[in-house]
Amino acid sequence: MPGLTVEGIAARAGCDLPERPSPETVLYIVFGTLWYRVLATRRPPDEALDEDLLAVLAPGTGR
């Protein structure tokens, strides 16, 4: 899918990506968390998980 990059997603969400962690590491963090959540706990992602990931990966965005 064109434009489906960490940078593109962040731009659409109104976030600026910091230089670190790298976009590749961000993908590992997000998808690793999602896989663990779904496969190990059998719980679907929810808004609280979304907010926690944003707080860790984009602190200070006010979300």
Image (cartoon, grey):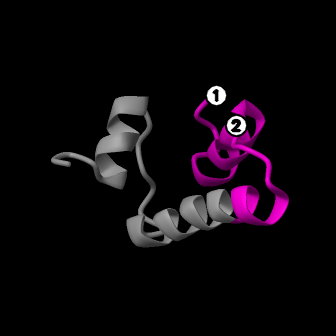
Find numbered disc 2 in the image and state the secondary structure of the residue it sits on: helix
> Quick check: is 37 in the magenta stretch?
yes
The disc placed on residue 45 is: none
Quick check: 43 above or below 47?
below
Q: Which residues are magenta?
A: 36-63
Q: Residue 53 placed where, x, y %?
A: 66, 48
Q: Amino acid at mark 1?
A: Arg
Q: Are marks 1 and 2 in contact (CB under 8 Å)?
A: yes
54 vs 48, left or right, is left
Of the image marks 1 and 2, the number of the one nearer the N terminus: 2
Q: Residues within 10 Å of mark 2 (few under 14, many from 20)?
A: few
Q: Circle 1 sits on which residue?
A: 63
**Residue at position x 68%, y 53% in the image:** 56
Residue appearing at x 69%, y 43% in the figure: 45
| Residue 51, label in figure | 2
Quadrant of the image occupied by residue 48: top right
| Image quadrant in which the C terminus is located | top right
Mark 1 secondary-structure assignment: loop
Would residue 14 be found to the left or right of residue 50 on screen? Answer: left
**Where does the image place residue 44, in percent across and percent down from the top left?**
72, 44
Nearest the camera: 27 or 18? 27
Is residue 44 positioned above or below 12 on the image? below
Magenta stretch, main secondary structure class = helix
In the picture provided, is 37 more to the left or to the right than 15? Answer: right
Give the residue furthest to the right. 41
**Picture mark count:** 2
